[in-house]
Image: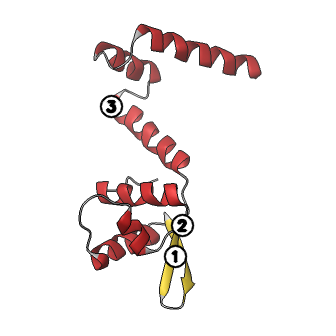
Amino acid sequence: MQKLTAKEEDIMQVLWTLEKAFIKEIMANLPGDQHYNTLSTFVRILEDKGFVAHNSFGNSHQYYPLVSKENYKKSQIDVTINNYFNSSYKNMVSFFASEKKITAEELREVLEMIEAQNKKK
């Protein structure tokens, strides 16, 4: 799955939250001033990329996501781990620990979650 630009991700975040929206509704949920035509162009690009589809209501289009937030997140995490951590989740966790982005207590909680998931299998 291709990586979205920052603007495209912002739009997708709005659509994932609202589930469906007209351009004006997307505009209202984005920070800063948005130009209607520019935003409409970005949404059409997302549609061309297969991330968004629409229902027509006369001349208006109500857009909705075709790609779930969860699927996009998984795809981008996999790319990041492959590109920056030699395809190793262990390397990723070690990086966060060394950068003090995760505590020992949080790591124990993650380990407990992993062990609980393994018991379910």
> What element does badge 2 sit on?
loop
Give the residue pinned by disc 1: 62
Q: Quarter of the image holding residue 4?
A: bottom left
Q: CA distance from mark 3 to mark 2?
A: 34 Å
Which residue: 46% across, 9% down? Answer: 105
**Which of the two discs, 1 and 3, sits closer to the camera?**
1
Mark 1 vs 2, N-terminal side:
2
Relative to 111, say whether 92 is above or below: below
Relative to 63, say whether 7 is above or below: above
Which residue: 51% across, 41% down? Answer: 74
> Would residue 113 be found to the left or right of residue 105 on screen?
right
Which residue: 53% across, 71% down? Answer: 53
Q: Amino acid at mark 3?
A: Tyr
Mark 1 vs 3, N-terminal side:
1
Mark 3 vs 2, N-terminal side:
2
Mark 3 and mark 2 in contact? Answer it, CB < 8 Å.
Answer: no
Q: Quarter of the image holding residue 94?
A: top left
Q: Amino acid at mark 2?
A: Lys
> What element does badge 3 sit on?
helix
Mark 1 and mark 2 in contact? Answer it, CB < 8 Å.
Answer: yes
Q: Amino acid at mark 1?
A: Gln
Q: Residue furthest bottom?
A: 58
Give the residue pinned by disc 2: 20
Give the residue pinned by disc 3: 84
Q: CA distance from mark 1 to mark 2?
A: 6 Å
Q: CA distance from mark 1 to mark 3?
A: 38 Å
The colour scheme used here is secondary structure
Which residue: 36% across, 76% down? Answer: 40
**Which of the two discs, 3 and 2, sits closer to the camera?**
2
Mark 1 and mark 3 in contact? Answer it, CB < 8 Å.
Answer: no
Q: Residue furthest front?
A: 28
